[in-house]
Amino acid sequence: MSETRAEAWVLDVGDADFETSVLARSETVPVVVDLWAPWCGPCRALAPILERLAEEHAGAFVLARVNVDEAVGAAQAFAVRSIPAVRALRDRTVVAQFDGAQPEAVVRRFLASILPTEADRQAEAGRRAHAAGDLRAAEAAFRAALMLDAQHPFASLGLARLHAEAGEVAEALRRIEAIGPGTPASQEADRLAAQLRTAPGERFDEAALRARVASDPHDPASALALGRALAGAGRHAEALEMLLESLRRDAHHDEDGARRTMLDVFSILGSGDPLTARYRAALARVLFR
């Protein structure tokens, strides 16, 4: 292996550069972490296999070699109990692993399970085309990915975005429904669906809606209508307060409409937003009082 290639595809990583060389890099390319030590015989048997396959795959993944005697923090992060230990990361998450020295055939199968598929490559091509404004090429690439993998989450999400931008809300939501929970795309899909469901409709008469809310303290429909209108206008704090008021009046009105709309607002804001934390707690108090 040439020195240039070794520098590009095989890295010696310590605690100081673990964030940038392993975690951040795994957002763009799979990173295979080889946790080893100089005194470990099985480690010395496994290392040449990993390095040879890194060269063979020519940058399809990065091999990060971590000496556990020197990078104690990294070893602790992976809860390593014995070495060699191999962990594969994509998007900062361990997606596959094995322990102990393994024959080359086993290592090849391991790599095949974590490297991008042709469907992945088509979906990424679609994402790039979409970002460049080439919507025709983006759609073609997303559909090509789905021909190869009918459940591909990022291809489904990409098509959903195209439908949403074209004003085809029902079709966008149908595409999103095909994305299963717990996939890498599910959080983005949930946020897009929430944005579509709370999108502003016709202009609303806020004064009239507020008058309706005030005129009957037992009517959940008026509070729900105002809450939804405020959510569509992006006035999330006011929307959440009014939706909570609708829940207080009748938690199950319109098939739990206020609760569902609050969950949509939480998806739009994100779990780290202070409003999400505040109103999640308030929602729980109302529902479980």
Image: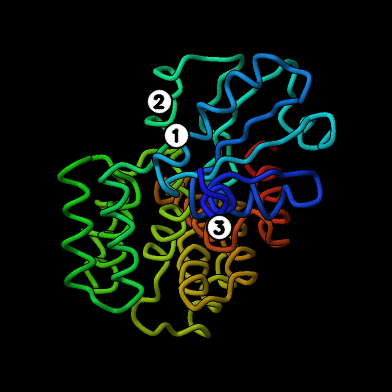
Q: Nearer the viewer, mark 2 or mark 1?
A: 1
- Element class at badge 2: helix
Tell me the tag on residue 53: 1
Query: Comparing marks 3 and 1, which lies closer to the viewer?
Result: 1
Occupied quadrant, residue 13: top right
Residue 134 image offset from top left, x and y in percent: 24, 76
113 lies left or right of 146: right
Residue kind at label 1, given as amino acid type = Leu
CA–CA distance in space, label 3 to label 2:
57 Å
3D distance between C-alphas at marks 3 and 1:
60 Å
Q: Amino acid at mark 2?
A: Arg
Left or right, residue 14 beside residue 207: right
Q: Residues within 10 Å of mark 3 (few under 14, many from 20)?
A: many
Q: Where is the C terminus found, in terms of image quarters?
A: top right
- Which callout, 3 or 2, points to the residue nearer the camera? 2
Residue at coordinates 24% horizontally, 73% vertically from top-left?
167
Secondary structure state at the residue bearing disc 1: helix
Q: Which residue is mark 2?
A: 108
Asked whether disc 3 touches disc 1, contact meaning CB atoms under 8 Å apart, the reply is: no
Amino acid type assigned to the residue bearing label 3 in the image: Ser
Please give the residue where the numbered disc 3 appears in the rendered image: 246
Q: Residue at x 53, y 76 (%)?
A: 234
Categorize mark 2 by other alpha carbons within 10 Å: few (<14), some (14-19), many (20+).
some
Instruction: Report helix, strand or loop for mark 3.
Output: helix
- Please say if 98 is above or below 213: above
Q: Residue at x 51, y 70 (%)?
A: 231
Q: Nearer the viewer, residue 270 or 114?
A: 114
Where 130 falls versus 73 (above or below)? below
Among numbered discs 2 and 1, the one appearing first in the sequence: 1
Q: Left or right? Give the position of 40 relative to 222.
A: right
The mark that comes first in sequence, 3 or 2, is: 2
